[in-house]
Image: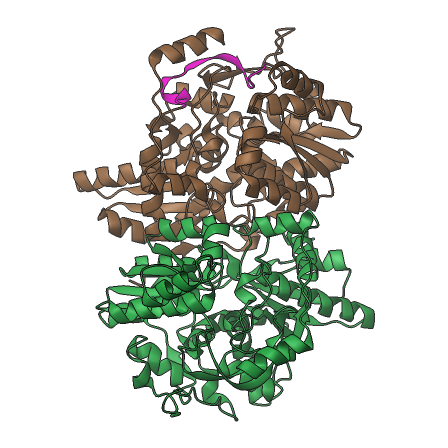
Chain colours: A green, B brown
Amino acid sequence: MSKRKKFLLSESEIPTKWYNIAAEMKNKPQPMINPQTKEPIKAEDLFPLFAEELSRQEVNQTDPWIEIPEEVRDKYKIYRPTPLVRATELEKALDTPAHIYFKNESVSPVGSHKLNSALPQAYYNKLDGMTNITTETGAGQWGTALAFAAKTFGLELAVYMVKISYEQKPYRRSLMQTWGAQVIASPSMSTKAGRKIITDHPNYQGSLGTAISEAIELAMQTPNCKYALGSVLNQVSLHQTIIGLEAEKQMEMTEEYPDVVIGCFGGGSNFSGISFPFMRHNLKGDRNTRFVAAEPASCPKLTRGKFKYDFGDETGYTPLIPMFTLGHKFAPANIHAGGLRYHGAGSIVSQLLKDGYIEAIDIKQLDSFEAGVLFARTEGIVPAPESNHAIAAAIKEALQAKEEGKKKVILFNLSGHGLVDMSAYDQYLAGDLSNHEVTDEEISKFLAEA
Amino acid sequence: MSKRKKFLLSESEIPTKWYNIAAEMKNKPQPMINPQTKEPIKAEDLFPLFAEELSRQEVNQTDPWIEIPEEVRDKYKIYRPTPLVRATELEKALDTPAHIYFKNESVSPVGSHKLNSALPQAYYNKLDGMTNITTETGAGQWGTALAFAAKTFGLELAVYMVKISYEQKPYRRSLMQTWGAQVIASPSMSTKAGRKIITDHPNYQGSLGTAISEAIELAMQTPNCKYALGSVLNQVSLHQTIIGLEAEKQMEMTEEYPDVVIGCFGGGSNFSGISFPFMRHNLKGDRNTRFVAAEPASCPKLTRGKFKYDFGDETGYTPLIPMFTLGHKFAPANIHAGGLRYHGAGSIVSQLLKDGYIEAIDIKQLDSFEAGVLFARTEGIVPAPESNHAIAAAIKEALQAKEEGKKKVILFNLSGHGLVDMSAYDQYLAGDLSNHEVTDEEISKFLAEA
């Protein structure tokens, strides 16, 4: 009773710089490579695609701290700083000696951490004189974030939304439209890439790979228009470090320090965000914090994938990226954590995993929802299906501490809420969800094609 | 740029007492009356229905301050104190000299202010030794709030949900079930009241009146079980004053004082919550703040109703309540602001309106959504359809200030977000929504029946 529950910062404590971990890594992440020339990608090579400052951030391996523009910090104030919360009710339910903290990114008006990168991406595009911007979205978290960010900086946004999600997740589509974005089901007739696949496969339900191709094609053909992406890229991890930088200050208020930091893992954006600021003390040898990436068992790139150069998209339009991958043709099962259904990990996380700074754990779908329901019934927040993976990993750590009779300080990132994903909970509560196994043969087959 | 956006309190500043305005009103609200005996209702008369302390709060006209139990304050910490936000982006869009502030109750994990009363109601029932509790819900905001509150205090909850909402708002139903409540479409076969109406009208889509009857009947027939209600009652207004008490401290931080305080109006719970703490200074003659209740034009009890004794429910099971009413048989149009579709106002608000402390304004459905979309595109938060009425009234005040070239400080309550109401925005953006006029003849007819 009467324990302090939330640890809040004031707006003046919003970080003024993002943390660029690449500058402090002993083994630098390997560069992206142009598949035609086999040359490493330089910032200028990316200018046609991304805003210039974003292109520079993408390849920056020298500056550990990058200034957050005043205009972006001003917009961050809409929802930041986000609370750090002690999960006292969950601790009680688990009867664990562990202290469990979570960083609550679900308080963003779009419901997830994605806005942390959407705002600077929209800002830098505006700064470059763009009037329009394009992107793709799978489940819709990224698309909703960029819809508001584009509107607030005065850009017109077109979102290619994977057709099956467009039909199954009408609320996410409505959200994007309410914020003023144009949403097109992909594949569409509006691009060559879309027209080709619709003609070849009339009933095709879409994929992130196709949606990326359409968004890039539209950006390339539209004056004053560039393209934006919500995960995997180094620039995205950079922007997301605002999560961990705030959390670091807030952990000081608790007078504890995390023994283990946990994030769910899709392309790496929220995991990098919560982890890198704490990890810099490991890099310097000052701390021995554990970092656990929780991925779905049905898409196990970190636990069962291979480190190699691979494409970022299914059709092979992107540069080659050095990554832990299941192969860019890998087709993950249709789990509800749509944000984690990605075949590869960003280049920085991949290098850090290789170098032993990161552990990975795979979580089965049913275990993730069991954890999410317990969290909802104790802490009150219904988590996003993606975030349930981080919660399941945190619960595992807490139960282990109980078994060992040891105190342990656990910090995880609650990347978003699940209020727009309730059909997933419906199916779980009705007993209609299942786990999805991936065989070693499947993984070998897709890796051989990559 | 760089203006302060949010005004935050620490957990230790969560109020320790609720404010009971009835104790300080010169003209006390008239008592509820037993329709059989015609006697005023005393606390003991309510014990079979409500927890004992709640029954005492319901009729208390002497104590201006009522202690918030430590156990309730502890649960309030899950989401309270809520932020007071300066709507700088909305101000810019309106180009107004007015300063617009809003109290953001949408950050509650159930998405609205309803949890402020659900938590104490569940707590006092637990204290009385209850193991079960029942309620009804229309659109679902109250049901979701009580679902989490019941779970967190270890009570089993049964919610009778109006059948049409049960079918049209599956996400709200899923939310209640995720928090562990049993949800039954009303009318149901589980009660006499439900069975009768199903038998008489096999295709009946349900109403709040029927759902109330079913919830009361189940509570009366279940051992260790009482009933809970989310609006209209004095106890609910009392609990909701935590909104205005926090806002008062936060307005001090802004170094401004509201010229006008605005809330949307259904049964009165959120309007009373934001208003009463500020209104006490008017009662003492120290301030001349204006208080504006924003009701839907299609359900205009405050602007076009009549003050009289009327039933709180359609079928007449409740005591007679002194209220501004359209008649308890009034059937409001099926607008999307489901929480505002109620025929009457609570007895305290009704007395204050009569005595000139409150102004009322009616807002048309299309104007409410226009305001809501502008708010979403500027401040980032998609508001609940109910809250859109408060926003529309605030915008009206701000534009008037612009016309008059006057500074004006406006405070409104953002009672909740609309993330689970996106189908309403869909219809608005598609041009499929309309306004609903009520004729004087209709009002006279229903009032004559009351």
The answer to if B306 sits in the magenta stretch is yes
> Where is residue B211, by image quadrant?
top right
Question: In the displayed structure, would residue B98 be above or below residue B327?
Answer: below
> Where is residue A278, by image quadrant?
bottom right
Between A306 and B45, the residue placed more toward the observer is A306
Residue A233: x and y in percent read 44, 77
* B439 displayed left or right of A370: left
Residue B18: x and y in percent read 56, 37
- What range is drawn magenta here? B299-315
- Report if residue B393 is visible in the image: no
The residue drawn where x is 74% and y is 37% is B127
* A4 displayed left or right of B390: right
* A138 displayed left or right of B203: left
The residue drawn where x is 72% and y is 72% is A408
Give the mark count. Answer: 0
* A246 displayed left or right of B357: right
Between B197 and B258, the residue placed more toward the observer is B197
Between A441 and A377, the residue placed more toward the observer is A441
> Where is residue A45, by image quadrant?
bottom left
Question: In the displayed structure, would residue A355 be above or below residue A442?
Answer: below
The residue drawn where x is 23% and y is 64% is A131
Residue A390: x and y in percent read 62, 66
Residue A43: x and y in percent read 33, 85
Question: In the displayed structure, would residue A109 be above or below residue B158?
Answer: below
Between B22 and B382, the residue placed more toward the observer is B382
The residue drawn where x is 61% and y is 44% is B174
Q: Quadrant of the N terminus of chain B?
A: bottom left
- Report if residue A178 is visible in the image: yes
Question: In the displayed structure, would residue B145 be above or below residue A43?
Answer: above
The answer to if A356 sits in the magenta stretch is no
